[in-house]
Amino acid sequence: MSALLINLIVQLIGGAIGGNVAGGASKSVDLGTLGNTIAGAIGGGVGGQILGMLIPMLSNASTTTDIGSLIGQVAGGGVAGAVLTAIVGAIKNRSAA
């Protein structure tokens, strides 16, 4: 597989995990398991790609055996997924009220 695809898969998984953690941590932003997973994966993919452009060391996580780059991909995707889930959940719950 290409390096870009592997990086994207790692970011999507990290984002999905981050989205579910954010939804579980605060019921005010919870979108349900499926909603948290989808929003987190989207946030992880987009945020991870942006982070990879800003920090070039993270963009070659799949082409090297550097565990730091891989952890950076997962962490970046997880944080971006959690942030997008929190934003979408807050907007959804605010508009429902």
Image (tube, rainbow, N blue to C red):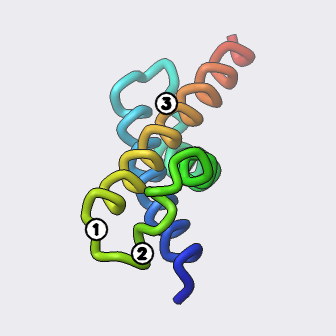
Q: Residue furthest top?
A: 97
Between the residue at mark 3 and the residue at mark 1, the CA separation in whole angstroms equals 34 Å
Name the residue furthest right: 95
The disc label shown at residue 62, or none: 2
Could you tell which of marks 3 and 2 lies nearer the N-terminus?
A: 3
Image marks 3 and 2: residues in contact by CB distance under 8 Å: no
Report the side of 40 relative to 25 (left or right).
right
**Picture quadrant of residue 92:** top right
| Sequence order check, earlier mark of 3 and 1 | 3
**Of the pair 21 and 72, the residue shown nearer to us:** 72
Tell me, yes or no, whether the two marked residues, 1 and 2, touch with CB atoms within 8 Å.
no
Residue most extreme to the left: 67
Q: Is residue 35 above or below residue 93?
A: below
**Residue at left 39%, top 50%?**
17
Q: Residue at x 51, y 62 (%)?
A: 59
Q: Amino acid at mark 3?
A: Asp
Residue at point 52%, 78% (across, down): 3
| Residue labelled with disc 1 | 66
Residue at mark 3: 30
Percent position (x, y) of residue 31?
Answer: 55, 36
Q: Position of residue 39 (x, y in %)?
A: 59, 45
| Residue 23 location, quadrant | top left
Secondary structure under badge 3?
Answer: loop
Instruction: Mark 3 vs mark 1: give the one in front.
Output: 1
The residue lying toward the viewer, choosing from 29 and 84, is 84
Q: Amino acid at mark 2?
A: Ser
Disc 3 crowd rating (10 Å Cα; few below 14, some 14-19, many 20+) is many
Inspect the image, locate mark 1, and give the three-letter code of the amino acid beneath it: Asp
